[in-house]
Image: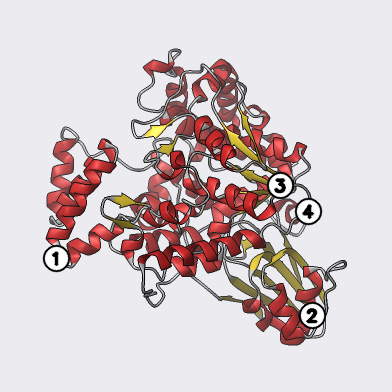
Amino acid sequence: MLSVFDGRLDNRDELLDALNLHSLPDAPLPDGEIVRAAYERWEEDAVPRLLGDFAWAVWNGRDRRLMLARDHSALRALFFSRGDGFAAFATGYRPLLALPEISRDVDELAVADLLLSSSDDSGRSFYKSISWVGPATRVVVAADGVRQERLWEPALRPTLRLPRDEDYVEAARAVFDEAVACRLRIAGPLVSAVSGGLDCSAVAATAARQRAPDTVHGLCAVPVGGAPLLAGASRYADERPFAMALAACHPNLSVECLASAEPAPFELDPVPVFLNGAVPFSGPTNLGWFMGVYQRAGELGATTLLQGHCGNITLSADGFDRLSVLRRDGAWLMLLREFAALRRTMPEPLWRGLLRYHALKPLPGRLRAGLRWLRHGGMVPSRLPPLIRPDFVRDASLAERFARDSAVFLDTRAANGRLAFLRYLVLRSRPVVEGIGALRIVTGITLSDPFGDRRVIDFCLSLPPEQFQYGGVWRRLARRAFADRLPPEITGNRRRGAQNPDWHLRLTPHREHFAAELERLDGSQLAGRILDLPRMKRILAGWPDDPHAVEGSGVLYHSTLMRALHLGRYLRWVEGGNQ
């Protein structure tokens, strides 16, 4: 029997007791040895007993079965390919593509999913001959076929009823503190992302409290000083004041603010990323803005970066789906009171959007469509990304696929909308898994998120909705639970931070380089079939010199166009033979 384990066990003591194993404090038994013993005892039934972030493979030579398993998070990737008389697996695409038995043909629907910000629930990957192991899934590959079983998924739990409102705060602190503590068992210095929001700040603050007086490094991506900043009306562009306020609360939290006036190297030449990860990034420009954080973490000697990306769908959820519950249940007076209270606490654009949603939602679908048509001057704007060739959209039935599978159509403000969004992000996480897996290979940094802990998710799905939103306060649970470790500047912040607000300064000097790369895509059969190259060239030609002439925050340029260009370069690289 051969067992290969990549990950971190969070229930070591429980497993050690069940397996009657001994682990000495000065010579702890490696996690890999524990899971090997678990397989020897329970075989494939060992998987649901594991808690943590992991990818695990076991070859059972006696029965000639290959078992592959992943936890529910998107932080560990695991892929496999099965052919005539062989099976292969890896935590990245590149080792599999090095095998002559495995085809390099890309799956064009998976490529389209990246542009559509969409994902189906199949086992497809970016390559036709490679499958991915899904979240919380156990896969068994044998001579007679492949068997897959999902072992956990987000679902509503029995409602937790506690005597006092404050008891929920204490319970939230307990489950979050435990999730953070599990993630401090790492090699190298402790490094956490820091921002002006509740999530990353709560992770960094909790880690600093648990590790005191040892130093915890906090890294914060910020715009270049003096740069024109492009952010929406309800967002703030600079995290510095919040990061400094957080550092003042925790003397052992050493915060660095990182800015760069230059693009990340892969934004200009992504080939090294493709050579190592064999997959494009879904948001290359925003990732480029954050690459200084990963680079600095590596310079500090870190192998793990704590962050809080799952906070918005767990402990720090805004709770706006509660308003739909009130409307559904006919609690009109309470609904009116909440809207009146929210108007005093919410940024005006957000409040108006919320009011418009609840005013239109009860109307028949055709009437809503008609009002939308009038609002947009007799036109109904397409939600499809504008840079996919119309004939490819038609031939691949992308409009239907987009309507069925895209996160754009998830109604997060509906009753149980938070659960629907959480299920989508967990169960359809393949593009995220691919991107994070490639980022891990390229940077050597493993991401770790306490908010994505299974215990945190289950706890949040057991709470009454008023714990998240009540009395005009949204993200209510997080604001109260983290008030003991975050400064009021952060717990009282009612706006979200803008990512990459100085993109115009970083990218505009390189337009000629992007134009030359775009011209090279004319020679790519794949890029020409999928991407609307003429329109991409028109958009690039219209890129304003003056940042103040950019409409809105410039998503068309720094997100839509640059993502399509990055993907086009990947397709051109694939046609070069994946060398």
Residue 151 position (above or below residue 132): below
The quarter in which the N terminus is drawn is: bottom right
Dot 4 lies on which element? loop
Mark 1 sits on what residue?
330
The amino acid pointed to by label 3 is Ile
Q: Mark 4 — residue? A: 187
Query: Can you say whether 259 is above or below 113 in the image?
Result: above
Q: Position of residue 489 (x, y in %)?
A: 44, 38
Most foreground residue, 278 or 477: 477
Residue 560 at x, y = what percent?
45, 34
Reading the chain from its start, which is encountered first: label 3 or label 4? 4
Q: In which quarter of the image is residue 223?
A: top right
Q: In this view, does 413 lie to the left or right of 508?
A: left
Q: Residue at x 22, y 43 (%)?
A: 343
Instruction: Please tell me which residue lies in front, 413 or 187.
Output: 187
Query: How packed is label 3: few (under 14 Cα within 10 Å), some, or many (20 or more)?
Result: many
SS class, disc 1: loop
CA gap, disc 3 and disc 4: 11 Å
User: Disc 4 marks which amino acid?
Assistant: Ala
Give the residue at mark 2. Answer: 37
Q: Which of marks 2 and 3 is nearer the N terminus?
A: 2
The colour mode here is secondary structure
* Residue 397 visible in the current orientation: no
Amino acid type of disc 1? Gly
The residue depicted at 17 percent of the width and 40 percent of the height is 373
| Mark earlier in primary sequence (4, 1) | 4
Label 3: which residue? 445
